[in-house]
Image (cartoon, rainbow, N blue to C red):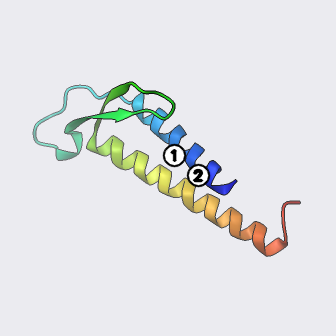
Amino acid sequence: MRDVTLASLAAALLVLATGAQAGPAPKDDPKQKRICTTETIVGSHLPRRVCSTVAEREALRNEAQEKMANLHRQSRAIGKTGGAQ
């Protein structure tokens, strides 16, 4: 069950990441460099081109790490109390 929750979270973050669009980036700021990748979305056979800036990718990665840490803390808290209340 826990693996399903983590997989669902990862899939949701990937879907959120595909909506990020970047405008023209100034050449002097490396965090505004636009990077495009081709990703296969979970549940689809068609790859999708995803473009975002380095700063946007870092923000998404940090958000995902925070959510995973919160899930980990919650699961440990539930384990210490003996189950959900």
- Expressed as whole percent of the image width and height from the top left, the position of residue 55 reads 30, 44
| Crowd tier of the residue under label 1, counting other residues whose Cα lies within 10 Å: few below 14, some 14–19, many 20 or above | some
Q: Is residue 54 above or below residue 40?
A: below
The Cα–Cα distance between marks 1 and 2, rounded to whole angstroms, is: 6 Å
How packed is label 2: few (under 14 Cα within 10 Å), some, or many (20 or more)? Answer: some
User: Horizontally, is 58 left or right of 25 in the view?
Assistant: right
- Viewer-closest of 32 and 6: 6
Picture residue at 78% right of the left edge, 75% below the top: 80
Q: Can you identify the residue that label 2 sits on?
A: 6
Farthest residue to the right: give it. Answer: 85
- Reply above or below: 3 against 18: below
Three-letter code, disc 2: Leu
- Read off the residue under disc 1: 10
> Which residue sits furthest front?
45
Q: Which amino acid, mark 1?
A: Ala
Q: Position of residue 20 (x, y in %)?
A: 38, 30
Please name whichever residue, 8 or 35, is drawn nearer the observer in this view of the structure: 8
* 57 up-or-down from 45: above or below: below
Residue at the left extreme of this rendering: 27
Badge 1 marks a residue whose secondary structure is helix
- For the point 35% across and 41% down, the residue is 56
Left/right of residue 33 with respect to residue 13 in the rendered view: left
Residue at (70%, 64%) from the top-left corner?
75
- Image location (x, y in percent) of residue 31: 23, 45
Label 1–label 2 contact, CB within 8 A: yes
Location of the C terminus (image quadrant): bottom right
Viewer-proximal residue among 69 and 8:
8
Residue drawn at 52 percent across, 57 percent down: 66
Secondary structure beneath disc 2? helix
57 left or right of 77 in image: left
